[in-house]
């Protein structure tokens, strides 16, 4: 029974990734392009969920299938949130470093 559950899980993930997955980063792989790509993938996943999965799934399978789709779309938004937080910290560090810059005479510049 466990092998059947694993096989079912893998099949579900393959279906989801066929719509929202990517094999490579967008080119050029800038933060803005990666962010836009994630949001477009999330949009495609939600559209597919609303138009294909929910209307065409029997009640017994609906909960698991919907869960897989929502989980992957949620992951995309979490990745985006992590990158935004990292970008915010990086920006803050670079601004703080700029405030503590010293001129040639060793005087702190603002």
Image (cartoon, rainbow, N blue to C red):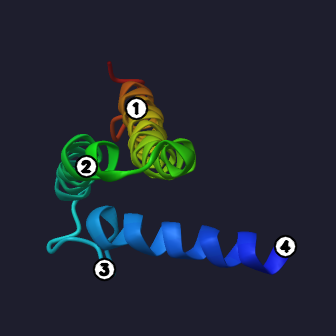
Asked whether the viewer can see residue 86, the reply is no
Give how far apart the Cα atoms at labels 3 and 1 are: 25 Å
First in residue order: circle 1 vs circle 4: 4
Q: Residue sitting at 17 percent across and 50 percent down?
A: 40
- Judging by the rendered image, the residue that carries numbered circle 1 is 88
Nearer the viewer's eye, disc 1 or disc 4? 4
Q: Residue sitting at 27 percent across and 65 percent down?
A: 19
**The label number, if any, that marks residue 35 in the structure image:** 2
Q: Residue sitting at 42 percent across and 29 percent down?
A: 92
Q: Position of residue 102 (x, y in %)?
A: 40, 34
Of residues 58 and 23, the one drawn nearer to the viewer in this rendering: 58
**The label number, if any, that marks residue 66 in the structure image:** none
Is there a contact, CB below 8 Å, between mark 1 and mark 2? no
Of residues 72 and 107, the one drawn nearer to the viewer in this rendering: 72
Task: Say which element carries label 1.
Answer: helix
First in residue order: circle 4 vs circle 3: 4
């Amino acid at each position: 029974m466990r092998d059947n559950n694993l096989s079912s899980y893998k099949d579900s993930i393959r279906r989801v990734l066929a719509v929202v997955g990517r094999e490579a980063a967008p080119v050029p792989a800038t933060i803005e392009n990666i962010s836009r790509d994630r949001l477009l993938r999330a949009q495609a996943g939600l559209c597919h969920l609303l138009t294909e999965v929910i209307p065409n799934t029997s009640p017994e399978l609906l909960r698991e299938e919907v869960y897989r789709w929502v989980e992957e779309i949620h992951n995309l938004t979490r990745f985006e949130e992590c990158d935004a937080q990292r970008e915010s910290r990086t920006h803050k560090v670079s601004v703080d470093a700029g405030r503590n810059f010293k001129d040639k005479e060793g005087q702190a510049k603002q």
